Structures are given as structure tokens and as C-alpha cells.
Image (cartoon, coloured by chain):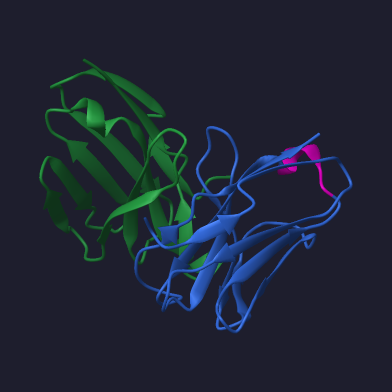
Amino acid sequence: ETGVTQSPTHLIKTRGQQVTLRCSSQSGHNTVSWYQQALGQGPQFIFQYYREEENGRGNFPPRFSGLQFPNYSSELNVNALELDDSALYLCASSLESIAGELFFGEGSRLTVL
Amino acid sequence: GQQVMQIPQYQHVQEGEDFTTYCNSSTTLSNIQWYKQRPGGHPVFLIQLVKSGEVKKQKRLTFQFGEAKKNSSLHITATQTTDVGTYFCAGKLMEYGNKLVFGAGTILRVKS
């Protein structure tokens, strides 16, 4: 177990709705990265939060937004859901923003109908 | 599109055969990491390579980082059914603020 927990594990939404996914990082880790993994694909980097500030962003539109809280837990928010947003959303915590391994949670599987 | 490319996409081997997956980037990587994802699971860290030409071994797994730091490989000797899963390489790219960018992965299936 990595000590990274995500909720919910599964959810179903319809197009146009909004969703919030949550992540609790491993104790002592101050950095959280979010990835989107479509079926049969590698994880795609969405963004990273380091000490409550966004610290790098991948090629995702502004309707993907996030937060990191003082306890280093994090949220991923997606507005105006589209069918292509259906994927496994993975949260990964790490000790530093630059170096070292990522500890992934089990993921939140989002289905958009 | 993928900044980090992996080949092959899929490999099916007989138990006891060797397996290799290759990872390539058009730009120099500051380091490269390898992860394994079991079916239905999440990626689990295997190793990190930092130095040009570095070679590391973990039991039956051998990892290499190219001299130019643009490619890497993972070789598994004498595969076992427990090796089944998808193997991802992930490199830190400057255009993403040195954040990890994953390849598409190589799916390994092992016939017993």
C-alpha cells in the first residue's frame, strides 16, 4: 500500500456536469500530481501541486482545475464534462516536486455518459 | 501526442522466455523512471535512472539508460507469470517543468 487514498473509486456523470475527485497524500509528502489514464493508454500529466501552489501543468484545458490544502491533500475538479473525459484519474504523491518516485493511489474511475 | 515513446505496444511470451521493452524520447531526459501496472491496478514504481549509460539490476530485471539520455530499456530474464502487467517508462521533460511524462506502456502477457 502506498498510503495514498482517492475517492470516490467509481462514479458516473453525464455530459455537461461537474465532478470533484479527492486525494489524500502519503504522510510527509508535500507534492501531489494528477494524471488521466484512458483505457489502454499511459497516464497523461494534468498538473502538479507543491505546497498549495500549482507547479506545472500538462496539455489540459482550463476546465480541469485543482487545489491543494494545508494538509497537502488535493482535489481535481472538472467542469463541463465531455465523453472523452471518461478515464481513470490517478493521484500521485511525492516528497519533492522535482526528484523521486511517485506513489500512486488506486484511482477514481470516471464514466461520462 | 506522446513525448515519450515505447515499443512494442504488446508482447506475449512463453514462460521462461526473455522480454525487453524500449523507451525513446526526442529530447534529453533529466532522468527516467520505470513503473509496473498490474491489470486493474495502479502504477507501482520500479526504479529511477539518472546517469548517462547507467545500468541497474533488480533480480531478473535489468534497466539501462542511454548514453545520450534519450532512451532506456527494461529487460526481464526468464519471465514468470507474476511478471504480467503493463510496463511504463516515464521521463522528466523540461517543457513540462521537469514533471514526469509517461510513455504509452508495453503490455506483457506470459503463457505458462
| Colour seen for chain B | green
Where is residue A7 drawn, in percent x and y? 62, 55
Where is residue B80 drawn, in percent x and y? 18, 27
Residue A107 within the magenta-colored segment of the rendering: no
Side of B104 relative to A64 (left or right): left
Residue B5 falls in which quadrant of the image? top left
| Colour seen for chain A | blue
Where is residue A1 drawn, in percent x and y? 36, 55
Residue segment shown in magenta: A81-85
Side of B9 relative to A67 (left or right): left
Against B12, residue B4 (above or below) is: below
For the C terminus of chain B, the quadrant is top left
> Residue at the spot x=56%, y=81% of the render?
A71
Q: Is residue A84 visible?
A: yes
Against B99, residue A78 (above or below) is: above
For the N terminus of chain B, the quadrant is top right
Side of B107 relative to B17 (left or right): right
**Main SS class of the magenta portion in the image:** helix
Q: Is residue B70 visible?
A: no
Check the image and name the residue furthest to the right. A16
> Residue at the spot x=33%, y=63% of the render?
B31
> Residue at the spot x=55%, y=77% of the render?
A72
Where is residue A108 drawn, in percent x and y? 61, 48
Against A111, residue A5 (above or below) is: below
> Residue at the spot x=35%, y=33% of the render?
B85
